[in-house]
Image (cartoon, rainbow, N blue to C red):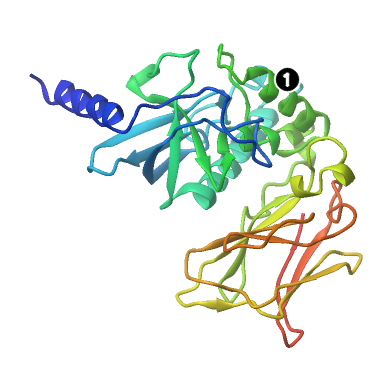
Amino acid sequence: MTAYRAGLVVALVVLAGCGGLVGDDAGPTAPGTAGSLPTETTRVSVTAVVDGDTVRVEYRNGTRDTVRLVGVDTPEVRAENDPAEFEGVPDTAAGADCLRGAGTNASNYAKDRLLGRTVGIATDPNLDRRGYYDRLLAYVVVDDRLFNYQLVASGRARVYDSDFSRRASFTEAETGAREARRGLWRCVDPDAADWETPTATTSLSGLALVEVHEDAAGNDNENLNGEYLVFANRGDGDLNLTGWTVTDAAGRAYSFRNYSLAPGERVTLYTGSGTDNRTARYWGASGAVWNNDGDTVTVRTSGGDVALRRAY
């Protein structure tokens, strides 16, 4: 048996031993996802991000694999982009160059959200398990959200032309992102696109703002927990956030109470109401806070010093 076949057999055994990878829609609904999550996932560690839609993972027994994310296609970083694949982007050198910048942005986003983390993966019932180059075709679930869908909703990917089961919701998310000119869809006017703003902003304290999800599904004021910020501690020690405030440009403020982040931990600050826990905090606002057409996130320490500021 060749080394390649032996590795493939091991990988298949691993998947079978983990209860299989499934992609049905019977799981719980989570904010920022395409409806429900897969009912079962296999836990893996993300060891490398190839680009926005391809990652390398390691199973618990040490077996490794390459995952191609189902239903999405981010612009190429190492190859030429064909603007004709992205509706409305001009088929010009400027359009292709702009898409390369969007591809880098998507890759950085994937690194911020996935690299070095343990995530869940699940295949789609309508598709073969493997695609080109023998890559596993899968959804990635991280922080109780479908990362594939987040790529499309934030404008970092287009919907890939295939018969995957969640295509309708992904297509709706793509339409919203395209109409709002989010992410790669700014390349419709390539001269106006700016990819210099980093995906994540990290302060000297180690606090990083790794995601701004300002545009909730539907009416923002009726879906307050569809609007949120994600912070991470990228420092080497615990970060005590007690008394730290988060404000928007209009001065509306949220204050952390009796809370700290360990190195590598993340917390999502939802605009609406809920029960606070280690990974989620709730603003309790009566209406939407973050403007869809741009705003500024400012974090101040308990002493009033600016720890982090990011405009989007």
Kind of element beneath mark 1: loop
Q: Is residue 132 left or right of residue 142?
A: left
Q: Residue furthest left?
A: 1
- Residue at the (39%, 19%) spot, across then down: 129
- Residue at the (84%, 57%) spot, across then down: 295
- Give the quadrant of residue 206: bottom right
- Give the quadrant of residue 190: top right
Q: Is residue 199 above or below residue 56?
A: below
Q: Is residue 63 above or below residue 204?
A: above
Residue 205 picture location, percent across and down: 58, 77
Residue 21 picture location, percent across and down: 40, 27
Q: How many labels were placed on the picture?
A: 1
- Give the quadrant of residue 247: bottom right
Front residue of 51 and 1: 1
Residue 24 picture location, percent across and down: 53, 22
Circle 1 residue: 87
Front residue of 48 and 46: 46
Residue 1 picture location, percent across and down: 7, 19
Q: Is residue 241 above or below residue 181?
A: below
Q: Quick one: label 1, few (<14), some, or many (20+) residues within 10 Å?
A: few
Q: Is residue 255 left or right of residue 86?
A: right
* Quarter of the image where the C terminus is located: bottom right
Q: Is residue 232 left or right of residue 129?
A: right
What is the three-letter code of the residue carrying label 1? Glu
